[in-house]
Image (cartoon, rainbow, N blue to C red):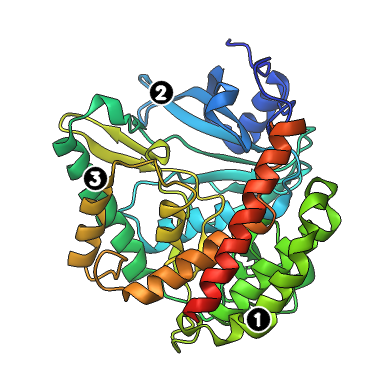
Amino acid sequence: MSSIDPRPSTPPHHPNYGIQMSTDNIRKLVHMALPEVKLADIESLPSFKSYNNRIYFLKCSRHTADASDLESQEFVLKINGRDFKGDKIENEVSCLRLLEKICPGIPVPRMIAWSQDGSKMAVARSDGSGMEEQHFEGNTGGWILMTRVPGEPIDLTEHKKERLADLAVQLADHVTDWRNNIPRHMNGGSLRFQEDEYKNSRPDITLTDSREPGANLMIRGILGEGICCLDPIATVGDYYKVLMEHKLRTLETNETFEPNRGLVAPVRRFMHEILPAMSSLNTGADTFVFTHYDLSPRNVLISGSPPQITGILDFEFAGFFPALDEFLNDYIENSNDWPKDVYEVYLKRLEENGVPTPMQSVEKDHWKQVYLLQQLVQNIAPWYLPGKYQGEGLEQELNKSKMLVEELLERLNRRR
């Protein structure tokens, strides 16, 4: 059986540094979740190919229906990295189950079992009737066991532009599927189980009419920013206010950002005087749409010739967000992930499918304003700092973000 020790090349600042589950515990987990299968092999995904999680590929076998032969099956065990809690598990599990229920044509992993804290697990019943809880102590934090969808991540260097354009059309059709079929919601944010602090609240989404784990869901907080909140985020203006308040708290309390604390006063002044009056946040359309939030080539699997999309991965930070957030992330955080002309094919197909995009249907001034606002939010206290930066390198990054925030405040003040 393959070694599953973490690779020594994992940088210490990566969340998956030092995260692992023993072979014995993986065997135990598989036996409890899938008693009818036999675990044959464990392969650990190299650390540099996964940042937030430790990933194991599990090869298993089971007898066919007539017991005359063995068929192979593959699963994925995804373990939370450091600093992540059960809310990340709840969000991804909820998003995948929501897609399975409402958009069965979208190729995403199917849930087998999960644990929010590593001490108890929810397991899909073999008859497909729902979930049940079992005790399991895996000496880890939260994890998810799911089916492995076929295919390999899109390698932009291996395909001509015509092939990539065809894949862009396919991806746009899948995005259209969830945009059209998963209902919009009046609250924005990530998905949580209706448990613990939310147990007395009315659910925003009901997956199944039962008391099984994860049957009822709340839309609360913004997982990707580490924001937890009891109250719902009900307007786009409130959404940006919550984001900026969180970034300001980080700026004020995290010693990494001490050199930039002179930004606190002008950013707070912007929040109180400019933000409430911004035209792009007062459109009267305060509904939130299902959003993947990281549709990069690495999260899209393809198979066959000509290639077809056979898997879409990594819904851990998905949720219900303002309609433009998917595109804002593409343009800012993932700005170089897709070739420009291929991404334009993707936007064009979305427009043809009736999904407004910055290419055509979204008013230019509106797009520019939220684009600048998103950049402002991200640079108040950049998430990637300190990370690999130290000394002079960190000083340069902090100064770069400080100058950009000052420039963005000035530009947004002119555009209100």
Identified by mark 2, the residue type is Ser
Q: Is residue 137 left or right of residue 235?
A: right
User: In terms of image quadrants, where is residue 353?
Assistant: bottom left
Q: Earlier in the sequence, mark 1 or mark 2?
A: 2
Name the residue beneath numbered marker 3: 342
- Can residue 15 be seen in the rendering of this structure? no
Badge 1 element = loop
Identified by mark 1, the residue type is Arg
Q: Earlier in the sequence, mark 1 or mark 3?
A: 1
User: In terms of image quadrants, where is residue 212?
Assistant: bottom right
Cα separation, mark 1 vs mark 2, equals 43 Å
Name the residue beneath numbered marker 1: 202
Cα separation, mark 1 vs mark 3, equals 43 Å
Instruction: Point out the frontmost of discs 3 and 2.
Output: 3
Badge 2 element = strand
Name the residue beneath numbered marker 2: 72
Residue 415 image offset from top left, x and y in percent? 47, 78
**Labels 1 and 2 touching (C-beta < 8 A):** no
Residue 295 image offset from top left, x and y in percent? 41, 48
Q: Is residue 111 above or below residue 304?
A: below
Instruction: Point out the frontmost of discs 1 and 2.
Output: 1
Q: Earlier in the sequence, mark 3 or mark 2?
A: 2
Please name the residue shown 60% across and 69% down the image. 216
Residue 84 image offset from top left, x and y in percent? 72, 46
Please name the residue shown 43% across and 28% down the image. 73
Identified by mark 3, the residue type is Val
